[in-house]
Image (cartoon, grey):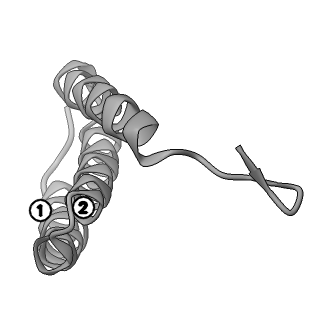
Amino acid sequence: MTLRGKIVIDASVLHVVLPILLVVCALLVAVFKDLIAAAITLAAFSLILALEFYLLQAPDVAIAEAGVGAAITVAIYVMAIRATRRM
């Protein structure tokens, strides 16, 4: 669909695409050998999940997921990874 020359994506399409992206991100987190890359992918997973919660009309859960899951948890993981020695 277009709206004044801009592309508009239907919500039903996003309800199909976002779970697929969640599965891809989860697989990438499990496959990555670099822990920083896995933590960043975990942040992407959390942001996609927050978007899905928002589309399901649960904005309070989406804000909590974005704040805790994408920001605080990943920041703690990155600090812990940087504090340890890599082999």
Left or right: where does residue 38 sit relative to residue 11?
Answer: left
Q: Position of residue 7 (x, y in %)?
A: 74, 49
**Residue lying at 38% horizontally and 39% vertically, measured from the top left:** 12
Q: Position of residue 72 (x, y in %)?
A: 16, 75
Could you say which quadrant of the image residue 78 lies in? bottom left
Label 2 crowding class (10 Å Cα cut-off): few <14, some 14-19, many 20+?
A: many
Instruction: Indicate the quadrant containing the C terminus: top left, top right, bottom left or bottom right.
Output: top left
Q: Nearer the viewer, residue 35 or 26?
A: 26
Q: Nearer the viewer, residue 70 or 35?
A: 70
Q: Earlier in the sequence, mark 1 or mark 2?
A: 2
Indicate which label's residue lies in the foreground, 1 or 2.
2
* Amino acid type indicated by mark 1: Ala
Q: Secondary structure at mark 2?
A: helix
Left or right: where does residue 38 sit relative to residue 68?
Answer: right
Could you say which quadrant of the image residue 71 lies in? bottom left
Relative vertical location of residue 53 with respect to residue 30 in this rendering, above or below: below
Q: Which residue carries the number 1 mark?
A: 80
Relative vertical location of residue 19 with respect to residue 14 in this rendering, above or below: above
* Amino acid type indicated by mark 2: Ala
Label 1 with label 2: CB-CB less than 8 Å: no
Q: Which residue carries the number 2 mark?
A: 50
Q: Secondary structure at mark 1?
A: helix
Q: Position of residue 1 (x, y in %)?
A: 70, 43
**Residue lying at 26% horizontally and 32% vertically, measured from the top left:** 19
